[in-house]
C-alpha cells in the first residue's frame, strides 16, 4: 500500500492541492499528515478542511499546540509577535479549530508498522541524531553548495556512524518512522527501519521552492521511498499573502514568510535572533518579546541589506 506523507503546510493551500494532485496521479489514496497545517499563509480553513477530508491519519504540530494553549479572550491579544496567530484565530472556523486541537501528538498505524509525529523528539530518545535542521542546512549550503544526493550521503554517514544511536535504533520495532518540523526533505534506511522527513509542503527551506512530500511503500521486505517535488503557483501565493489581511495584521513577520516562499531558505530563525539581540540591548529576556523589541527587530531585519537579513 502506498502512502503520501505530507507535513508543514503552514496554510499554503495551493501547494497542498498540487501535492494531492501529484500523488493521486501516481495511484496514492492514503495520505498521512505530520502537522503544522495553518498560520503563515492566509488559507487556514481551506488547508484544514482539505486535511480533514483526505487524511488517512494525522498528528498535530507545534502550530496546532498554539491553538490548544490559546487564551481566546481577545483582550489578552496584545503581543505584536503573535499577530499572525491572532489573525488566524479570528479567521478559522470553530469546527476546524476543534479538529486541529483534537489531533494526537503521535500516532501508530499498527498493521503497516508506521510511527508518526511532528517532531523527531516524539519518536526517538535521542532526537539530536536525526535533527538535520534548516539553519544548519542554510549555513552548509552557503559555505559550499551541495546536491540533494550529497546531502543524503551526509545523512547516511552521520547516522550510520553514530554507534549509541544505532544500538538504541536496533532495539526499536521495525517500521517507518515519520516526522516533519524542520522543512528539510530526507530519508534513511537501516536496521529494518525507515526514518523519513518529507520536507515542507508549504514552506520548503532547502533552496527549492517547489512543494515537497514523499511517497512510501513497503514491498519485497523493504521500504521504497519516492521523494517528490511539485510545482505550484508560488508567485500567486505570495501575491495573495501580500494583499491579505494577514499581511496587514503582521507585516514584519509576513515579509519574512514572503522571502521564504521566494527563496526556500531559512529566514524566521534569523528574525528571532535579531529580536533576541534587540531584547538584550534593552535589558529584556525571554519570550514573548515586548512590542517595542518586536517592532524594532522587524524594522531592522527588513530594512537591512539582504546579507544581513539572511545572516544577522
Image: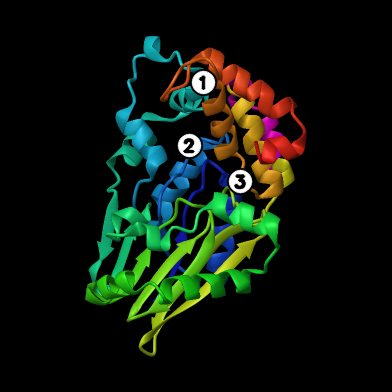
Quadrant showing the N terminus = bottom left
**Which residue is tagged 1?**
279
Name the one closer to the observer, 150 or 92: 150
Name the one closer to the observer, 116 or 26: 116
In the figure, residue 244 lies in which quadrant? top right
* Residue at figure coordinates x 23%, y 69% from the top left: 110
Q: Earlier in the sequence, mark 1 or mark 3?
A: 3
In this view, the residue farthest toward the right is 305
Percent x, y of residue 219: 40, 85
**Element type at mark 1:** helix
Percent x, y of residue 248: 63, 21
Is there any visible trace of residue 298 in the rendered image? Answer: yes
Is there any visible trace of residue 20 in the rendered image? Answer: no
Label 1 Cα neighbours within 10 Å, binned few <14 / some 14-19 / many ≥20: many
**Which residue is tagged 3?**
266
- Circle 1 or circle 3, nearest the eye: 1
Amino acid at each position: 500500500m502506498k502512502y503520501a506523507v505530507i507535513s508543514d503546510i503552514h496554510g499554503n493551500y495551493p501547494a497542498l492541492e498540487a501535492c494531492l494532485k501529484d500523488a493521486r496521479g501516481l495511484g496514492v489514496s492514503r495520505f498521512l499528515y505530520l502537522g503544522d497545517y495553518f498560520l503563515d499563509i492566509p488559507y487556514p480553513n481551506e488547508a484544514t478542511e482539505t486535511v480533514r477530508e483526505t487524511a488517512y491519519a494525522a498528528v498535530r504540530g507545534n502550530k496546532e499546540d498554539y491553538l490548544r494553549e490559546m487564551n481566546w479572550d481577545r483582550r489578552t491579544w496584545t503581543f505584536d509577535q503573535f499577530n499572525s496567530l491572532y489573525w488566524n484565530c479570528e479567521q478559522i472556523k470553530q469546527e476546524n479549530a476543534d479538529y486541529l486541537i483534537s489531533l494526537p501528538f503521535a500516532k501508530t498505524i499498527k498493521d503497516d508498522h508506521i510511527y508518526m509525529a511532528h517532531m523527531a523528539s516524539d519518536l526517538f530518545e535521542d532526537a539530536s541524531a536525526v535533527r538535520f535542521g534548516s539553519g544548519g542546512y542554510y549555513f552548509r549550503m552557503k559555505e559550499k553548495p551541495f546536491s540533494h544526493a550529497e546531502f543524503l550521503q551526509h545523512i547516511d554517514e552521520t547516522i550510520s556512524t553514530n554507534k549509541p544511536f544505532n544500538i538504541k535504533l536496533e532495539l526499536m520495532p521495525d517500521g517507518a518512522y515519520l516526522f516533519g518540523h524542520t522543512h528539510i526533505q530526507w530519508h534513511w534506511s537501516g536496521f529494518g527501519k525507515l526514518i523519513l522527513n518529507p520536507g515542507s509542503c508549504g514552506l520548503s527551506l532547502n533552496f527549492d521552492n517547489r512543494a515537497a512530500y514523499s511517497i512510501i511503500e513497503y514491498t519485497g521486505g523493504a521500504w521504497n521511498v519516492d521523494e517528490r517535488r511539485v510545482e505550484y503557483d508560488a508567485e500567486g501565493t505570495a501575491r495573495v499573502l501580500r494583499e491579505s489581511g494577514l499581511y496587514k495584521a503582521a507585516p514584519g513577520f509576513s515579509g519574512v514568510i514572503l522571502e521564504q516562499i521566494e527563496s526556500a531558505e531559512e529566514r524566521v530563525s534569523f528574525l528571532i535572533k535579531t529580536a533576541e539581540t534587540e531584547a538584550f540591548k534593552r535589558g529584556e529576556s525571554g519570550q514573548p518579546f515586548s512590542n517595542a523589541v518586536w517592532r524594532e527587530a522587524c524594522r531592522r531585519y527588513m530594512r537591512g541589506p539582504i546579507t544581513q537579513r539572511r545572516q544577522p
